[in-house]
Amino acid sequence: MNNFWQKLTKPIFALAPMADVTDAAFRYLIAKTGKPHVMWTEFVSADGLALAPEEGRKKLLLDLKYSEIERPIVAQFFTASPEHMKKAAELANELGFDGIDINMGCPDRSIERQGAGAALLKNAKLAREVLRAAKEGAEGLPVSIKTRIGYNKPELDTWLSEILKEEPAVVTIHARTRKEMSKVPARWEFVKRAVEIRDEMNSKTLIFGNGDVMNVDEAQKRTVETGCDGVMLGRAIFGNPWLFAKRTPALEEKLNTLVEHVKLFEEMLGHIKNFAIMKKHFKAYINGFDGAVELRGKLMEANNAGEVEKIIKEFLG
């Protein structure tokens, strides 16, 4: 079994998968600027891959595009169908991914209506079947899951005990319930409890924590407090591809990196994704300095990478 997880030095710091944020362009930039130990793709619908007509499937496959410098790279899928999960795992193997992850925590209503994402928290039997199917299709690639501490209330003891019976390589615990979304502070005491449950079961599964961690130093502290094997950082990467390098760039470098980010997006994904997706990044890059509000206002009017570059060049004079 090709389990790259066992070769990594702990604590392990990973980049969280975020829809329309951690796409192939941004991940390439992060890998180049300050690489985490492991990267995840955005989540992809295993049902879509199995059922979508050719055009729709092409679009989904774009979310599974990656560059060699991102390795180890994990493909994340969501589904409530063991059969579709098996096919998605087979595809990830064909595409050369290092691992496979199943999303069992996303609170998006449309995903839950399919019985996937956080809805699986209410159906441990099906969750285990999906996990088993992924392992079958993965043919030796490590399979992990990303989940929460419960649906309406914390149910980590019963839920995690069931999941660990399938021996996933990693379980990443977002330290909130589905009901809490991201409205309350993450409850890291449950990550500590997850480690205890794992140890009580003599499981080899790695436990990662996720939620509200804003930098690598804080992530390090969390691993000491909870005993977890790693931390997944998400929103902290917005406008900050230097996050894992633990470096704060000068303003000029920051603005030039934004230009590079926009160009990469256009080059790699522009033929199929809307340029407006990039605008959510502008606010993150452009803040906390004189003239930021005006500059951001101008950038929000831009329609392509060329216009963004021109506005930034004029600003830097």
Image (spheres, helix red, strand yellow):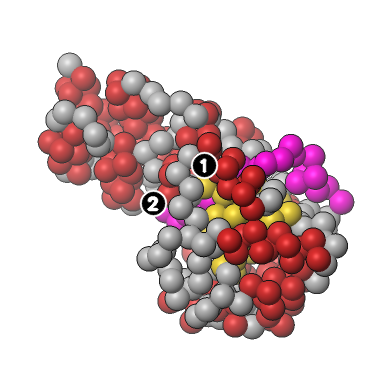
For badge 1, the amino acid type reads Glu
In-image side of 182 versus 314 (left or right): right
Q: Relative to 218, is 316 above or below?
A: above
SS at mark 2?
Answer: loop
Residue 135 visible somewhere in the drawing: no
Disc 1 crowd, CA 10 A, few/some/many (<14, 14-19, 20+): few
Q: Which mark is residue 134?
A: none
Residue 119 visible somewhere in the drawing: yes
> Which residue is more in the foreground, 235 or 51?
235
For badge 2, the amino acid type reads Lys
Q: Relative to 241, is 50 above or below?
A: below
In-image side of 280 versus 217 (left or right): left
Q: Quadrant of the C terminus?
A: top left
In-image side of 237 versus 53 (left or right): left
What main secondary structure does the magenta stretch of the protein show? loop
User: What x and y, as percent, mark residue 156?
Assistant: 64, 72
Residue located beneath label 1 in the image: 218
> Which residue is more in the foreground, 254 or 216?
216
Judge depth for marks 1 and 2 and give the one in front: 1
Q: Residue at x 17, y 22 (%)?
A: 314
Q: Residue at x 74, y 66 (%)?
A: 197
Q: Which mark is residue 273?
A: 2
SS at mark 1?
Answer: helix
Disc 2 crowd, CA 10 A, few/some/many (<14, 14-19, 20+): some
Q: Residue at x 30, y 20 (%)?
A: 252
The span shown in magenta is 1-20
- In space, the residues marked 1 and 2 are separated at their CA atoms by 34 Å
